Image: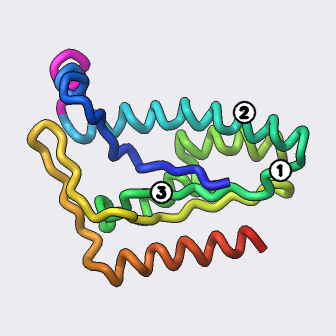
Amino acid sequence: MIHVVDWGFTCPRDSVVRRQWIEEKKRDTIEKLRQHNLEVECRDFEKVCERIRESYAVFKRPKWLMIAVTKADLFMDDLNEAQAYYHPKVESPFTRILKEQLLDKVGDQHITCRAMPVSAWDMNFEWNGEVVPSNIGGTNEARALFRNFLQALAVLEA
């Protein structure tokens, strides 16, 4: 199973909702938006863990979980920090859910979990006039991330 996350770098596409989030909900900076998104991501992941547990109880599957940390082009300078936030051996709000809601209940001997950064699209992230520039460093770096992701995935599949 591949679960896709983005380290909080997502925003509503609807311009009315964007305005509401900025003006009414006071998510007026990228960091405030990211913190909100990370909280939502954790709530969503709790539901994913529940479904995996249900599947495992019946089918003894999945045997592995790859957490694809997308939009790596936005945090190349913080790549280790972003990857660690999702890594099962590191403590974070996300991994607390991973451990308590999945690995402790299914057993880490029964399901293997990895987190790997990847970037599918090189694009700046803009929110309320603030910009996080894409800084992947070129096609070769993007391909290297993708190759690393595929190699890690191949090991899980073996």
Q: Quadrant of the C terminus?
A: bottom right
Circle 3: element type: strand
Residue type at mark 3?
A: Val
Distance from the alpha carbon under mark 2 to that under mark 3 = 21 Å
Where does label 3 land, which residue?
69
Where does label 1 land, which residue?
61
Distance from the alpha carbon under mark 1 to that under mark 2 = 13 Å
Q: Position of residue 18 (x, y in %)?
A: 22, 28
Mark 3 and mark 1 lie on one chain; the one further toward the N terminus is 1
Where does label 2 land, which residue?
50
- Label 2 crowd bin: few (<14), some (14–19), many (20+), radius 10 Å: few
Q: Which residues are magenta?
A: 21-28
Q: Residue furthest left?
A: 129
The quadrant in which residue 39 appears is top left
Distance from the alpha carbon under mark 3 to that under mark 1 = 22 Å
- Determine whether 154 is above or below 47 in the image: below
